[in-house]
Amino acid sequence: MKIIILGAGQVGSSVAENLVSEANDITVVDTDPHLLQLMQNRLDLRAVVGNAASPSIMRQAGADDADLLIAVTQSDQTNLCACRIARSLFNLPTRIARLRSADYVEYPELLDDNNFAVDFSICPEQIVTEYIRKLIEFPTALQVLEFADGMLSLIAVRAVAGGPLVGHPLADLRRHIPNVDARIAAIYRGEKPIIPSGETVIQSGDEVFCLAATRHIRQVMRELRKLENPIRRIMIAGGGNIGYRLARSIEERYEVKVLERDNRRTDFLALNLTKTLVLQGDATDEELLESENIEDMDMFLSLTNDEEDNIMAASLAKRMGARRTLALINRKSYVDLVQGGPIDIAISPAQASIGTLLAHVRRGDVAAVHSLRRGAAEALELVAHGDRATSKIVGRKIEEIELPRGVTIGAVVRETGQHRLIHRENTPVMIPEREVIIAHHDTVIESEDHVIVFCVSKKQVAKVEKLFQVGFGFF
């Protein structure tokens, strides 16, 4: 695909890095020549210096024959204006915009073809907020990802000595929890991926990806490590977009404190948060943390815009007794260095939100994409179409499908033929019932199934997409 990315910041560079490796023709536009030069030093792409919302700059970037525009600058106005120009002047087929303000979600008509002409909008801050909220619900997890509207969860857990399944082959999982169908999708031992089989023995320290119906996920986690007590008390360092959104979404269920350095922002938080205790101060101030009983905190979340501060604050909080710590860190190299030490979980905001963008870029009918292990691996929810004559997967048992090495089909979500009544905005709606089927060697894929596929390396994604394409006949 020929793709134009507007904005060379954290989100833009992360998108470019993911897409360049898949042999796409990428052009990045930004007003900062230094940022563009840094990207060109690392990646094989074109760079154009200039205003992303300028028609002449967009033409220079190749908008006349581009397939996709991804507008992810820091400015909502620039992103919206660029999408409108791309549609009106260049008839560019697909336009994605990053929108940081929640206002636009309340007025979706502003994004239709008669207005700003945005096909898909994403808000990385909101995506990261949801991501962190899930980690609060499952405090021992490294990653919690949902598929099929939340029916199915993929969870990454660090196996710990003493877990019932640790030191035992995976075949024992069924014996340990006979009433739960689950699948170990992948295991990472250090940086090395291990393709799981029934004989694979889980070792302490392994990073294990488990797939199960969401209602069963805690039972599966208990097999790998002792579950900690639920989170009750949370301290958030940083009241910016993510810190504020998170506090607002969890303050009804948890005891929340927010530490914010800036005077004016503190006033805003105190005015807009109802049950959260807002404090002005520096999260790296040892005396402040001690006075606010950091040792009683079940979780300390360092969510400021400064990654060095986040590393320092989370490390200090852990040393002073916080049970679990999480830090936002932009640079992937830092994430690998600090996670697992005093910082239990390190999150790269760009990596956490990249999956939403990739779902719109992937070929075929892709319902969801999740980036795993800082972008090294990927999990996809693909919709199967066609029949045995036109598809390489439909009408076939999983053992008959020629999957690339390192690719596993973890589960299938299928409509049962039944319907149930729900209410959307006070309007009754009949929706189809669906069931989760954990994949086994004799599971047959049917047309319209949502198939959850795990790729231990991103290099395999293109092969998987090709596998799901419908042809005129493969005989």
Image: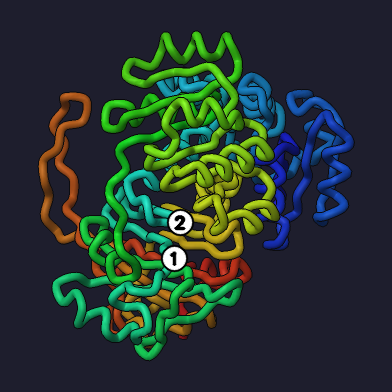
> Marks 1 and 2, Cα distance to the nearest angstrom?
7 Å
**Placement of 65 over or under 183, stated as above or below:** above
Q: Residue 386 in the image: x percent, y percent?
A: 37, 68
Amino acid beneath label 1: Arg
Q: Residue at x 72, y 42 (%)?
A: 4
Tell me the quarter of the picture where residue 18 sits. Answer: bottom right
Whether label 1 touches label 2, CB < 8 Å: yes
What is the tally of numbered marks visible in this picture? 2
- Kindly tell me whether residue 474 is visible in this rendering: yes
- Whether residue 444 is visible to the viewer of this picture, yes or no, is no
What residue appears at the point 63 percent right and 58 percent down from the top-left corner? 336
Asked if 170 appears above or below 266 in the picture, the reply is: below
- Residue bearing the label numbered 2: 142
- Say the numbered circle drawn on residue 158: 1
Three-letter code for the amino acid on which mark 2 is drawn = Leu
In the image: residue 88, left or right of residue 439: right
Q: Residue at x 41, y 26 (%)?
A: 257
In the foreground, 104 or 217: 217
